[in-house]
Amino acid sequence: MSLVMNEPTTKYLLLEARLGQKLTDYVAGQIGAGAGWKAIAADLSKRTDVPVSRESLRVWFSGRVQTTAVITDVPAESVA
Protein backbone atom coordinates (compact mmCIF):
# COMPACT_ATOMS: atom_id res chain seq x y z
CA MET A 1 0.00 0.00 0.00
CA SER A 2 1.28 3.43 -0.82
CA LEU A 3 0.04 6.44 1.10
CA VAL A 4 1.58 9.83 0.40
CA MET A 5 0.66 13.29 1.66
CA ASN A 6 2.25 16.50 0.43
CA GLU A 7 2.25 18.66 3.57
CA PRO A 8 0.84 17.34 6.83
CA THR A 9 -1.42 19.57 8.91
CA THR A 10 -0.80 20.36 12.55
CA LYS A 11 -3.55 17.94 13.56
CA TYR A 12 -2.05 15.22 11.37
CA LEU A 13 1.34 15.67 13.08
CA LEU A 14 -0.30 15.67 16.53
CA LEU A 15 -2.13 12.44 15.70
CA GLU A 16 1.16 10.81 14.66
CA ALA A 17 2.90 11.98 17.82
CA ARG A 18 0.14 10.67 20.07
CA LEU A 19 -0.26 7.46 18.10
CA GLY A 20 3.47 6.73 18.23
CA GLN A 21 3.63 5.64 14.60
CA LYS A 22 3.17 7.05 11.12
CA LEU A 23 -0.46 7.84 10.45
CA THR A 24 -0.08 6.41 6.96
CA ASP A 25 0.93 3.04 8.41
CA TYR A 26 -1.96 3.06 10.87
CA VAL A 27 -4.54 4.00 8.21
CA ALA A 28 -3.16 1.50 5.71
CA GLY A 29 -3.42 -1.25 8.32
CA GLN A 30 -6.97 -0.30 9.23
CA ILE A 31 -8.10 -0.09 5.60
CA GLY A 32 -6.36 -3.39 4.89
CA ALA A 33 -8.33 -4.94 7.74
CA GLY A 34 -11.57 -3.75 6.16
CA ALA A 35 -12.35 -0.71 8.32
CA GLY A 36 -14.11 2.31 6.86
CA TRP A 37 -13.35 6.00 7.42
CA LYS A 38 -15.92 6.34 10.23
CA ALA A 39 -14.53 3.39 12.20
CA ILE A 40 -10.95 4.50 11.66
CA ALA A 41 -11.76 8.05 12.83
CA ALA A 42 -13.49 6.76 15.96
CA ASP A 43 -10.63 4.41 16.86
CA LEU A 44 -7.98 7.03 16.14
CA SER A 45 -9.80 9.65 18.24
CA LYS A 46 -10.08 7.18 21.11
CA ARG A 47 -6.42 6.12 20.92
CA THR A 48 -5.02 9.65 20.69
CA ASP A 49 -7.60 11.75 22.56
CA VAL A 50 -7.59 14.04 19.52
CA PRO A 51 -10.93 14.43 17.75
CA VAL A 52 -10.62 13.56 14.08
CA SER A 53 -13.44 13.23 11.60
CA ARG A 54 -13.92 10.67 8.89
CA GLU A 55 -13.98 13.59 6.48
CA SER A 56 -10.47 14.66 7.53
CA LEU A 57 -9.22 11.13 6.95
CA ARG A 58 -11.00 10.94 3.63
CA VAL A 59 -9.46 14.22 2.48
CA TRP A 60 -5.98 13.20 3.65
CA PHE A 61 -6.04 9.68 2.22
CA SER A 62 -8.82 9.23 -0.35
CA GLY A 63 -7.40 8.16 -3.68
CA ARG A 64 -4.13 7.26 -1.99
CA VAL A 65 -5.21 4.00 -0.37
CA GLN A 66 -5.02 0.80 -2.33
CA THR A 67 -6.01 -2.51 -0.83
CA THR A 68 -5.91 -6.07 -1.99
CA ALA A 69 -8.76 -8.39 -1.14
CA VAL A 70 -7.81 -11.72 0.34
CA ILE A 71 -10.27 -14.57 -0.02
CA THR A 72 -10.02 -17.38 2.48
CA ASP A 73 -12.09 -20.45 3.22
CA VAL A 74 -13.27 -20.92 -0.35
CA PRO A 75 -15.67 -23.87 -0.50
CA ALA A 76 -14.09 -26.86 -2.28
CA GLU A 77 -16.84 -26.93 -4.89
CA SER A 78 -15.83 -23.37 -5.92
CA VAL A 79 -12.32 -24.46 -6.85
CA ALA A 80 -11.99 -25.75 -10.40
Image (cartoon, rainbow, N blue to C red):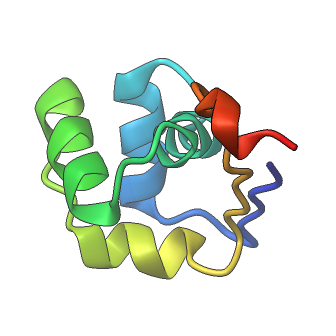
> Which residue occupies the extreme right position in the image?
80
Left or right of 9? Residue 3 is right
Residue drawn at 56 percent across, 23 percent down:
21
Q: Quadrant of residue 75?
A: top right
Residue 10 position within the rendered picture, expressed as x and y whole percent measured from the top left = 42, 59
Left or right of 35? Residue 70 is right
Q: Nearer the viewer, residue 27 or 77?
A: 77
Residue drawn at 62 percent across, 45 percent down:
24
**12 shown above or below 47:** below
Q: Quadrant of residue 65?
A: bottom right
**39 shown above or below 23:** below
Residue 68 position within the rendered picture, expressed as x and y whole percent measured from the top left = 74, 51
**17 shown above or below 78:** above
> Which residue occupies the extreme front position in the image?
77
Residue 9 position within the rendered picture, expressed as x and y whole percent measured from the top left = 49, 66
Residue 34 position within the rendered picture, expressed as x and y whole percent measured from the top left = 44, 46
Residue drawn at 40 percent across, 67 percent down:
57
Residue drawn at 34 percent across, 73 percent down:
56
Which of the image's four quarters has the C terminus? top right
Q: Nearer the viewer, residue 15 or 69?
A: 69
Left or right of 68? Residue 45 is left
Q: Nearer the viewer, residue 57 or 67?
A: 67
